[in-house]
Image: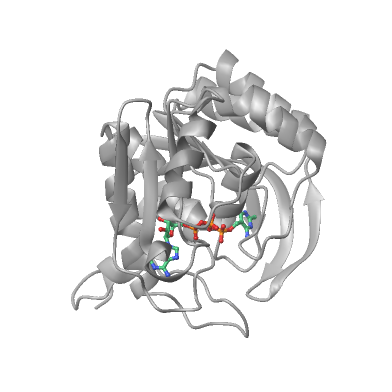
Amino acid sequence: MTPPIALTIAGSDSGGGAGIQADLRTFAFHKVHGTSAITCITAQNTLGVTRVDALPPESVGAQMEAVVSDIGVQAAKTGMLLNQGIIAIAAQSIQTLQIPNLVVDPVMVSRTGAQLIDDAAISTLRTALIPLATVLTPNRYEAQILASMEIHTLEDMQLAAQKIHRLGAKAVLVKGGGMAGNLRGVDVWWDGQAIEILETEVVETTNTHGTGCTLSAAIAANLAIGHNALTATRLAKVYVTTTLHYALAIGKGQGPVGHFFPLLQPNVLLG
Ligand SMILES: Nc1ncnc2c1ncn2[C@@H]1O[C@H](COP(=O)(O)OP(=O)(O)O)[C@@H](O)[C@H]1O
Ligand SMILES: Cc1ncc(COP(=O)(O)O)c(N)n1
């Protein structure tokens, strides 16, 4: 068996809900072999992040080189890259290793609005990494920074997607999880030709930890399988909505989305 192969370049979430843990689980449930280049280690649970340790940028570059030179990848995604040095080496390695199909989740601001990386890192993300993206997936707050505008309405999401597209990504998906009301289930796609509104039902749960990581990993998995970028994104949106329906009520805070639904029928594996 020779499965499709995807690479996640992202941070570790000790609580298992987001970061590389969510990415590898998402790849597996798409029958895609997951590989990883770990950028940082967070001490994290459902209540928040208590500590972050970055890996040296050279370590991130070496992990990418090791995976691609031997195993090869059909798609990659980036998640929490943390600092300017890691962003620069990730961007450089993506080019020299000629990684096709890149999903950039520009992890900069949490859903609560807290900025996670400094201004120098945001600048390198903008100029070095975003232009390499096949699909760029900012949340509401990241889109506000990248488009230099406030986002309150569906029209604002559309305008922001168009403005951000000028940074050089092939397609931009402005995600609606941080919006109000029904817009929480709406993402806006712009690829320079057509606006597409990707809408699913809103799932009423506070257990939404890992939605962004899961979405971008699912897009990368679908690209590795061979879907075009818009189809890959539509399928990923349905996948993340399903994981919200099966979200895990664990911990004292915001629990993670749940990926086990294909295993819940009797007679699958141990049943
Ligand atoms: N309550 C919800 N119901 C349905 N879809 C949601 C909900 N919250 C987030 N999503 C979806 O999850 C994906 C991730 O979006 P978002 O939560 O905005 O990203 P991030 O985790 O980066 O802040 C998007 O496709 C968004 O539409
Ligand atoms: C290591 C790591 N990477 C990314 C996120 C963002 O998570 P979300 O998918 O909820 O936006 C996180 N909380 N931790």
Residue 216 visible in the picture: no
Q: Quadrant of residue 49?
A: bottom right
The number of numbered discs placed on residues in the rendered structure image is 0
What's the image's color scheme? Answer: one colour
Image location (x, y in percent) of residue 39: 69, 42
Image height of 76 relative to 25, above or below: above
Residue 145 visible in the picture: yes
Image location (x, y in percent) of residue 167: 56, 25
Left or right placement of residue 82 versus residue 111 in this view: right
Image height of 111 relative to 89, above or below: below
Question: What quarter of the picture does the N terminus occupy?
Answer: top left
* Residue pictured at 29% horizontal, 61% vertical: 200
Left or right placement of residue 52 versus residue 173 in this view: right
Question: What quarter of the picture does the C terminus occupy?
Answer: bottom left
* Residue pictured at 31% horizontal, 26% vertical: 193
Image height of 183 relative to 107, above or below: below
Q: Quadrant of residue 176?
A: bottom left
Left or right placement of residue 62 versus residue 219 in this view: right
Depth check: 113 or 229 in front?
Answer: 113
Image location (x, y in percent) of residue 124: 72, 28
Depth check: 16 or 87 in front?
Answer: 87
* Residue pictured at 44% horizontal, 79% vertical: 205
Left or right placement of residue 48 versus residue 234 in this view: right
* Residue pictured at 40% horizontal, 78% vertical: 204
Image location (x, y in percent) of residue 242: 31, 66
Quadrant of the picture in which ligand 2 is shown? bottom right
